[in-house]
Image (cartoon, grey):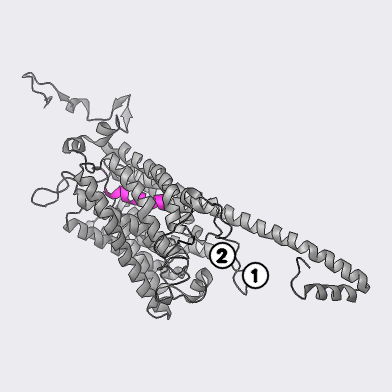
Amino acid sequence: MAGCVDGDLSVLTGLLAASGLNNASSSQVGELLCSKFDGVSATLSSHTLAVDSIYLLFSTYLVFSMQIGFAMLCAGSVRAKNTMNIMMTNVLDAAAGGISFYLFGFGFAFGRSAQSNRFIGSNFYALKDMPSEVNGFDYSFFLFQWSFAIAAAGITSGSIAERTQFVAYLVYSSFLTGFVYPIVAHWVWSVDGWLGAAATSRLFGVGAIDFAGSGVVHMVGGIAGLWGAYIEGPRLGKYTRDGKPGMDMKGHNASLVVLGSFLLWFGWFGFNPGSYVKIVVPYEGSSFEGNWSGVGRTGVTTTLAGCAAALTTLFARRWFTGHWNVTDVCNGLLGGFAAITAGCAVVEPWAAIICGFGAAWVLMGFNYLANKAKYDDPLEAAQLHGGCGAWGLVFTGLFAREKYVLEGYGPGRGHGLFMGGGGRLLAAQLVEILVVMGWVTVTMVPCFWFLNKSSLLRISPEDEMEGMDLTSHGGQAYYIDESPLGPPQSFAKTQTPEGSKHGFEN
């Protein structure tokens, strides 16, 4: 009988007969009830899918709001003369990344077909055959993954700010979101991949745990930015010819930096908890706990890691410099978030504080090394996302709790070395760090090298001194009384009596 599994009809008929119905009536009522079970089950299943889809879409909107945060953070971290340029690159990261991820990226990351392999996906190009009931993929899942892909591209744009040609942004952003990032996502997050704990065949039998992308998103974007900034070289005037510190090139608006940091914090509540993808998943043996519990705990660990990193940076920088520097604190905060992203769902809240503390020192350490190496990254993006992302993977290999790993991934996965899990998970985490660095290097270095050799990467020295807002975007970002923002009139350049082209009034 449809709707009843073996034995259900006889049990139901027996209960009805025990209540006083005769055998014939009990059989008829039992068959009627069984016939309704399919409809009830389908309705409940549809409601569950709807709730999960709404949750995923809501998380997507939060993650996408991070693009506002990136835009504000980038704008405040560059000089005023390049504000429009960096804002335009943030818009193009989303737009160009949307097309490339739609055409190729999603298929490379999550495509599943007879030709799929552990290296790259091979289906769902341009969303063909979507939605896919077999794989459980709906359009909401594509949109969520797209918001992650453009986040990686946004990270890279900060590293090469204030000196990069606009066409270069279009090329690298499309390449990164359409090919480089999706391959790493396939390795770690696809069930066909070879590296992640979600795969059916896992590295060292356990797989690497990178729940929301310390490696997949942050390291990919950070390492790409590292090579872009290295190939371009520092901004003019950042260092003198003998390698000594030159001009002070701090960002022009700390208010925008703080605004952007808070918006990114807000968006991270979709980035990390949203990576559960489904929320209506009860845990075995419990009617009180489920994915909804994990979502809440993930929000807590994310918050605590960021708070710990911000406070550590605050007092450390005060000790080093004698100042309470808000932009340093904001970068420390974001470093904590980037680090906890890998293990946010599988560690205890107290461990998240350790993660944030470590992330702050990792960021300050890499900033020190960058300065010694004369490496110029206006937003500290490579140090923050690349360095803290790598620390987050190591941290997860040390502190992942067995109970949370079981709830998030199922049995047969590893847990942290310091939590009694041995070294297999830590080894898998270290492998992820190495392969992400290697993959991004062998793909993005040729990309930036080709752009550089083709004179498509760096702007001219004259344009760099003038500012890209004027030379590339037709004006400045800030105007007062309909006049470009500039020096006071008493210091304005004027024509000297001798006819010199440039002079100053006395």
Q: Look at the picture and state if 369 lies above or below 60.
A: below
Question: What secondary structure is the magenta-colored segment mainly?
Answer: helix
Locate residue 307: give its quadrant: bottom left
Amino acid carrying mark 1 in the image:
Ser
Q: Is residue 152 magenta?
A: yes
Quadrant of the rendering where the N terminus is positioned:
bottom right
Please tell me how crowded label 1 is: few (under 14), some (14-19), or many (20+) other residues with Cα within 10 Å: few
Q: Is residue 394 visible?
A: no
**Magenta segment boundaries in residue numbering:** 148-161
Q: Is residue 346 left or right of residue 45?
A: left
Q: CA distance from mark 2 to mark 1?
A: 11 Å
Quadrant of the rendering where the C terminus is positioned:
top left
Q: Is residue 264 magenta?
A: no
Q: Is residue 82 left or right of residue 405?
A: left
| Residue identifier under label 2 | 291
The residue positioned 20% from the left and 60% from the top of the image is 369
Say the numbered circle drawn on residue 287: 1
Q: Look at the picture and state if 418 lies above or below 387.
A: below
Please tell me how crowded label 2 is: few (under 14), some (14-19), or many (20+) other residues with Cα within 10 Å: some
How far from the left and from the top, in percent, is residue 323?
Answer: 26, 54
Viewer-proximal residue, 481 or 375?
375
- Farthest residue to the front: give it: 114
Q: Is residue 468 left or right of residue 394?
A: left
| Mark 2 secondary-structure assignment | helix
Say the numbered circle drawn on residue 456: none
| Mark 1 secondary-structure assignment | loop
Q: Is residue 442 visible?
A: yes
Q: Look at the picture and state if 73 lies above or below 341.
A: above
How far from the left and from the top, in percent, is residue 283?
Answer: 59, 70
Amino acid carrying mark 2 in the image:
Asn
How far from the left and from the top, in percent, is residue 5?
Answer: 74, 71
Viewer-proximal residue, 71 or 360?
71
